[in-house]
Each structure stands twice: as structure tokens, then as C-alpha cells.
Amino acid sequence: MLCFILYTALLFFVMWLSSRRSSGNDAFFRGNRRSPWFVVAYGMLGASLSGVTFMSVPGGVYYGDFTYMPLVFGYVIGYFVIAFLLLPLYYKLNLTSIYSYLEQRFGVSSERTGAIFFIISRLLGSALRMYLVVFVLYELVFSSWGIPFWIPAVVFIALILLYTFRSGIKTVVWTDTLQTTFLLLAAIATVIVILKNLSMSPSELLSASASEGYTRIFETDFHHPKYYWKQIVSGAFITIAMTGLDQDMMQKNLTCKNLRDAQKNVITSSFLFIIVNILFLTLGAALIYYASHTPGFELPVGPDGRVLGDKIYPLIAKSMGGFTLVCFVLGMVAAGYSSADGTLTALTATFCFDFLHFDKRDDLSEQQRVRYRKMTHVGFAFLYLLIIIAFRPFHNDSLINILFDIAGFTYGPLLGLYAFGLFTKRSVLDRYVPIVAILSPVVCYILKLYSPVLFGGYQLGFELLLLNGLLSFLGLMLISRK
């Protein structure tokens, strides 16, 4: 509990430093366009990792070995597309909300369709990431005190609301650097402690893990959901959609001083992301090797007898003593804050610019804009809280798979819309765009459900996003004209 209080105090100190000179709408939405690119690049690691990477990627090694890495290699391809295709467009149009592009290209219905799909995806995805953090800390600390689950959830959301309330994205850019640091330190410290307990060096651990099959990177079975080429292609499009077409991630990039700085930030982030994911997969190998070679230790299992990957790290951290547990708690607290602060700010920006049209309405005074912004910010925080509390009875699988499924269904229409806008010169019947955007995920859901039967045993995995985007593109073609 003391770790949580001290870390939160440090976070609010960073908030005070970053917001003391400016707190208006331009600071809240665009950070006054003064963020140093290297600060954004480093902070984006924490925003991309979240509590799901912190727990699900290491835990996923139990069933998937290192087959997550081809997905990460695909991320790098996606980051280059963002740097040299999407960022120039956003800076050229001087956008605050990236979905304003859809209004300029197609019309208001398209803009709001894109914004709604982002809001649904981010509300669900980010709230579930935050849920995982609250759930683990509740199990480790608060449940033994007899405190209901909803109380720590309320505390977390209230604190995030408070430190983003004044300066929004300007504060988030700097607090993300703090959160990235603690996430990485927690993972590194845990690996060091495990190596010390096992009396092994890092190379010895990886060699021993390889001999037991934990470090296999490439899945060569074409029918498998993690077939490596499918992972690479999916990783590229996941990054394009979940970063390049995501207001949360792009809003941070758009706080850089100019396009060149934003591009340097994105390219740097892509290569750092490879290194960081290798670290977390190594952590996973260390955790599983430690569990299998420690007498009397049993991995956590669910009612169906399957090992619960999300619970491996917290259980081992708790069993290894105070220092490891403190590192884990600090990492989880950092992950919790990084999962929600930027998203809450991005949701507010999307609603204010794509529905209230702050950039076009001359009838609103600055005071009215600030008031509407604050009301929107509080409203999304409340929705966040409701989703976190409502999800608890349904948590019985690795969240990283659930999150990628959500992304596949919700970012697919965005991928189709932007691809159609960028690579064709055709106009669409704007009023029919929402219908196309709804039908595409429905068809994809049916195909995913019956893919083994329809395609001779082939299972749709992360490439669901690409298929969804393609169906959206074809649907837009049907309602388009020269």
C-alpha cells in the first residue's frame, strides 16, 4: 500500500511540474506542440505495454513459447507506414482529432463512424487493461482486508481523472516516461532475483529454457493461429490500426514540434519495442523455468484445469518475498496508470472535436469549451469504471487474446475507411458508411466462428483485423462513385 501511495505522490508531482505554466485547451489536447520527440518515444513504450503486456506476455510463454515475437517484427513494418504515410497527412491537415480527416474526405457520418468505433474499442480495451491491474492488486492486497472490489477501482479512476483533469495530454506525455521506467525496472529486477535464486546467468537461463522448448519463436504450422508469416502480416496491420488510426497514440505524436520530430519518435519507438518485448518474453521464460524447478510450487489453474497465464507472475512474485512483490506492485501500478490516462484524454478529444466540433464552432467561448471538456472527461471516466466493475465475473482467459479480438472487430472498419480514402479518389454515399462499418465486423465474427469448418481446419487469428478492413474497403467500393 505504501508503494502505491508513494508512486502516486510522485505522479502528481510530475503533473504539477508539467502543467504549472499552461492548462488551457491547447495544452490539454495538443500539449502546445512542444513535446520533445525522445520523451514521447520513450513514454510510448509504457503506453503500448500496459498491464496486459506486463502479465499476459510473460504468462503466454507457457502455452505459446516466444511465438509472440513475429507479431512484434510486424509491428516495426507498421511503424514505418505510420511514420511515412499517416503522420505527414495528419501534420499537413493540422489535425487535433485524426478522425476529422474522414469528415474532410467523405463527410460527417464517416467522421462520426470512425470516432464511435475508436470510442468503443478504446473504452473496452483500455478499461480491460485497467481491470487487470485493479484485479491483481485487489487479490494481492485489498481482498485480505475485506474491501469490496469496486473500491480500489473507484480510487484508481479518481486518481487518473485528477492528474489528467488540468493539462491532459501535456501531463500524460511526461507521466508516461515515469510509468515506462517503472514497468521496465520491475521486469528487470524480477529476472535478476530469479537468476539469483536459480544460481544461473541470463545465457544459462535462455539455454535451459530453449532445451525445454520455451523459446521457440516461429510456428510453422500453416493452420495454427500463430503461424509466423500470419503473425508478421497481422502485426503490421495491428500497428497501423491500433497506433496509426488510434487517437490515443497519435495524439501523443501530434504534440511533437514538427513532422520530422514525430517521425523520429515513431521509428525510435519501433526498435525499442523489439528490445522491450524480448525482455518480457525472457521474464516469462524465467518465471516458468523457476516454477517448474522449484519443489512444491504449483502453477495457478482455473476450474477447467488450464494454467492461468495471467496469474503466473503475481503468484511467483508473492512467493519470492518482499522485494520481488514490491517490484511487481510498482510495475502494475505504473501499468494501470499508463493504460488509462492517455486514453481518457484521447476519448475526451475525440468527442469534443468529432461530435461537439470545437474546431468549427465560433459560438462557443473558451470558458464554455473548457466546461464541456471537463464534463466529457468526467463522463468517460465514469464509463471506464462501469466496464471495469462489470467485467469481473467474465475474466477466465488471457486478456491479451480478448483485447486482440476486440481490436480485430473494432479497428477493421477504421482500416477500411482510411485505406479507401488514401488509395482511391472515389467519393462515397456518406449516409451509408455506418451500415458498411457495422456489417463488416458481423461477417467477420461469423467467419471466425466457423473458419475451421469453412476453410479446412484453418483458424482465423490476428489476421481477422486485415480481413475486416478488406471487407470494409469492398463495402465502401459498393457505395462509392467517381
Image (cartoon, rainbow, N blue to C red):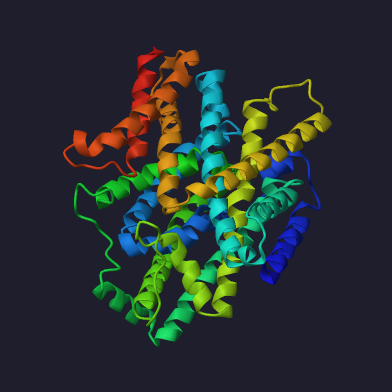
Q: Residue at x 51, y 32 (%)?
A: 117
* Identity of the residue furthest to the bottom in this view: 199
Q: Is residue 69 left or right of residue 187?
A: left
The structure residue drawn at horizontal position 59% and vertical position 57%, both measured from the top left corner, is 134
Does residue 360 appear left or right of residue 76 in this picture? right
Q: Quadrant of residue 461?
A: top left
Rendering coords of residue 120 (x, y %): 53, 35
Up-down relation of residue 47 to residue 245 (above or below): below
Numbered-mark total: 0
Left or right of 357? Residue 445 is left
Q: Which of the 4 image quadrants contains residue 344?
A: top right
Taking 42 as reference, is 419 above or below it?
A: above
- In the shown orientation, is residue 335 left or right of residue 166? left
In the rendered image of this protein, does residue 189 appear above or below residue 50? below
Q: Taking 287 as reference, is 13 above or below it?
A: above
Q: Check the picture and name the quadrant holding the C terminus.
A: top left
Q: Quadrant of the N terminus?
A: bottom right
In percent of width and height, residue 109 lies at: 54, 19
Return the residue nearer the eye: 396 or 159: 396
Q: Position of residue 418 (x, y in %)?
A: 45, 30
From the viewer's side, name the closer residue of 85 and 63. Answer: 63
Confirm whether residue 429 shows in the render. Answer: yes
Q: Nearer the viewer, residue 3 or 42?
A: 3
Residue 103 placed where, x, y %? Answer: 55, 22
- Residue 80 seen anywhere in this rendered image of the structure: no
